[in-house]
Image (tube, grey):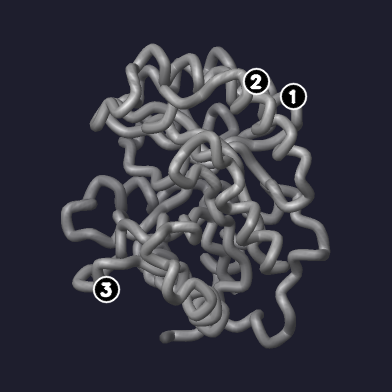
Amino acid sequence: MLVDSHCHLDGRVFDGDRERVIARAREAGVAFMLAIGTGEGPPDLEAAVRIAEDHPRIAATVGVHPHDARKFDAATADRLDVLCGHQQVLAVGEIGLDYHYDNSPRATQKRVMIEQMEIAAARGKPIAIHTRDAWDDTLELLRSHWAGTGLGGVMHCFTGSSEHALRCLDMGFHLSFSGVVTFKRSVELRATARWVPEDRLLVETDAPYLTPVPYRKIRRNEPRFVIETARLLASVRGVALERIAESTTRNFRRLFGLDPRFQPTAGEAGISAT
């Protein structure tokens, strides 16, 4: 059994075959998916919730991506708080800072990240963090506004250095590896993936983005391809694929406190090579 801990199932590229994408993931051994609810930004915060409500083993997050921080207002904060009470919302995210594109002013990104961390803390929810070209500011905000909550969270699509990894681990975060770790250029990232504690590992696709090797020629990523990231982690760590599947699934369930509603059926418990 595998868990895709971060996928954007609401993406428009899935509009024509979303149900088939989900079915293919199940057939490949992906028994659970976390649909990320940032969507196209406010005022709609329920993109992932709508999908989760229709699928018993898909859960959702809610949050405002740093690209859309400029759209965040008091009404957004109120709605986010209410949605945190939804039974299938497991976390607030993806939230954070993105200085690569600067689609929202940096000061606004910081303010909105802090406000969302405050909502998550009040609701007792973990957070899923996006950071790009903003490691120093991201880690400082997490240290000053989140680490003390003890709620932890996920460093989504971790691509930082070994120093970044240590600082995230020290604050109680799990590191989620995506298809990027399979890319030829990701030598340092694979070195980091080799030593990250087994009980802090997660795997994700970030579908429809970041398609892993050997499917890089396919433009659109899908949750079923998470097995390739798990396979790579197994290889660099010198363990069986089944061990990575078991540990990352256990880590996910522990972090998010999944209850029996999200148990896979017997037919979904095996990993497929396809």
In the image, residue 19 above or below residue 168:
below
**Pointer 1 local density, CA inside 10 Å: few below 14, some 14–19, many at least 20:** few
The dot on residue 248 is none
Q: What residue sits 64% from the left and 63% below the top?
A: 58
Question: Identity of the amino acid at label 2?
Answer: Glu
**Is 148 situated left or right of 196 in this image?**
right
Q: Earlier in the sequence, mark 3 or mark 2?
A: 2
> Label 1, label 3: how many angstroms apart (C-alpha)?
41 Å
**Pointer 2 local density, CA inside 10 Å: few below 14, some 14–19, many at least 20:** some
Q: What residue sits 73% from the left and 52% below the top?
A: 88
Q: What residue sits 56% from the left and 69% below the top?
A: 2
Question: Identity of the amino acid at label 1?
Answer: Ala
- Element marked by disc 3: loop
> Which residue corresponds to mark 3?
215
Q: What residue sits 49% from the left and 61% below the top?
A: 9
In the image, residue 240 above or below residue 173:
below
Depth check: give the residue in front, 17 or 236.
17
Residue 225 x %, y %: 40, 71
> Which residue corresponds to mark 2?
118
The dot on residue 122 is 1
Q: Are marks 1 and 2 in contact (CB under 8 Å)?
A: yes
Judge whether residue 164 can be spotted in this image.
yes
Q: Earlier in the sequence, mark 1 or mark 3?
A: 1
**Is 125 situated left or right of 106 in this image?**
right
The quadrant in which the N terminus is found is bottom right
Residue 156 quadrant: top left
